[in-house]
Every structure is written in structure tokens, then in C-alpha cells.
Amino acid sequence: MRRPLTMMAVAGSLALAIALTALAGGAGHTGHSGPSATATTDLGELWAIPPVEVAAVLLLGALYAARVHRVGGISGLRRFSFYSGLALILVAVCSPLGGVAQQGLMTAHMLQHTLIGATAPLLLLLGVTREFVRDLLSPRTYGVLQRLQNPLIAFPLWALSTVVWLLPDLHHLVLETPPLWILQQVSFVVLGTLLWMPVVEVIPAPRWFSTGWKGSYMSGVWFLGLGIANVYWFSGTAFYDSHAEAALAWGVEPLEDQANAGTVMMVLHCLLAFGAITVLFFRQAREGELSQRLIEAGIDPDRVAEAIRGGTGEALARLHGVSVRTRAGID
């Protein structure tokens, strides 16, 4: 049953992407325009339906829907999160934001990449469960991903990719070369997903990577964004000649556009990192309290640690009649 559903999803997604591209042919871009000395500021002309990106997103959505329909086990909130991640990718590449980024405005380019490479991957991961992922992947693929998501591997890969794609010469080639543009976007999604995996743990992370370490890990995400932003803010040099014409068309100097791009990266990294750190802080306090209660109830500490880490601590507590929450004045 899985094979026909997969084939139907692939065929339907490709057909829909081609149809949408044809319908949009007279109203907007269908591909990658590249940097232009005649960059338009008419947002109505900047809508785009790049067929490769649209087909990939629709295919992923169709496969997810087919899988959820077949095996179930995914709550409505998780489904909303996953589809929101897909929608965010579509907004980033199809809306005027994508058109402005392709024309070369650095601020738009940075916003697009941060949405695709940091925000959307988190939403996609929050849309699945450990059981869903384990059933979906082959044992070999599961094992490879478990090794790659080691924080000591995932973070350096993501950081290196972020820095390399921002090198001026490579950045210029990206704007002028559609296949390289697509490769960049795919790498942002893939490595952004890898970055978040040890935090969300749809595949178990190394045992040593506790909630406290996750907070430090997310601080590193913020520091990288802050470091790049500082280079853009205080260099006194506009690094990207390819973005100059688009910046001037939108009424900003190239150096100002670069500084604005740094601000976009820093702010979004700050929101994501410190949002995650806040959640992790309260989770750590809650997990510590629950862990102590379970151990005091006579449950094996190793079993408690495994349940807490796997998100089944509350279920274990209910199974043994242990209170999940502290009741003021009673406990």
C-alpha cells in the first residue's frame, strides 16, 4: 500500500506544481531573476512560483499527509506545526519576499534564508514524533541521522554552512546561478533541520546532551548570529556588490542594506535561541521535580532517566500513581 500512495503523491505534487507555474506565467516570475540593475519595487510583479521548490514542498506535504493517514498517531497540533513549516517555506520563496531576495536586496535575502533555514525546520520537526520517524526511516538511515545529529557534528556543520554561503564571491554566484540558488535553499533546510534535531529529539540525542547542555547549544546559535551581525554593522565596507543595485532601487545604501541584513539575522536568531532557552529552562525545572518524585517512589533511576528524556515521564508517573505536579500546601 505504501508504494502506490507514494507514487500518487509524487505524481500529484509535480502535476500541481506544473499547473500552478503555468497559471502564474502571465502574472509573475516562475523562476530565478537574479540581481538586476532595473530591480522593480512593484510588489505585484514580484510574486513567483519556482517549480522546483514548489514541487518539493508539495511532495513533502503529500507524503506526510499520506503517512499520517495510514499510520495515525499525530495530533492536530503537530499536523498544524508541520504544515505551517511548509507554508513558511512557500511564503519565503513564492511571495514578494522571494522576488526581492532574488533581485538582490540583502535584507530580504537574509530574512528569506533565516525563515527557511531556522524557523521552518523547527516547525517541521515539531510536527512529528519519535515513533513516526522510527517507523518512517529504514534502520540504516535512522542510524546515520542519529550520528549526524550529534551536537558536536550538527552545530559545526550548520555554522560552517551559514558562513560559507555568506562569502561574497559565492553569494554572487548564488544570485546568478539558479541551480546553486536551489542548492543553497535545500542545504539551509537540511542543515537547519539537523541543527534542531538534538534539541527536539525526534531521534534520541546522546545521553550526555541534557536539557542544560541544550540551553548552551542554543546560546551558540545566538552568538553566531550576533557575530555575523557585528561584522555587517561595524565593517564600514559593503561586501556584496551584487546587492548594490537592488538596495539603491529600494532607496537604501548598500552598506545600510548590509547592516539591516545583520539586524535581521541577529533578531531572528535571538528570538529562536532565547525562546528555546526559556522553554528548556522551565522544562528542566519540571523534569527535575518529576524525576525526584519518581525516584522517591522507588522506581529505578535509570528507568526514570530514560522516561524523562523520552518525554514519557508523566505517563510513568501516572502508571505508578505518582503526582505529576506539586500541590502547594499539600506536597
Image: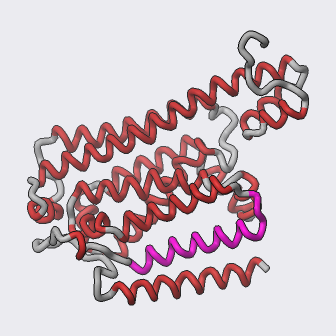
Identify whether 79 is placed above or below 276. Answer: below
Residue 152 appears left or right of 241: right
Q: Magenta segment: does it hold 165? A: no
Instruction: State the residue at coordinates (70%, 53%).
Output: 129
Residues drawn in magenta: 50-73
Front-lying residue, 271 or 142: 271
Magenta stretch mostly in which secondary structure? helix
Instruction: State the residue at coordinates (20%, 61%).
Output: 105
Image quadrant occupied by the C terminus = top right
The image shows residue 16 at horizontal and vertical percentages of 51, 84
Q: Using the rendered view, name the quadrant where residue 60 is placed.
A: bottom right
Residue 145 appears left or right of 260: right
Q: Magenta segment: does it hold 63? A: yes
Front-lying residue, 54 or 325: 325
Front-lying residue, 286 or 135: 286
Instruction: State the residue at coordinates (42%, 47%).
Output: 159
The image shows residue 154 at horizontal and vertical percentages of 53, 47
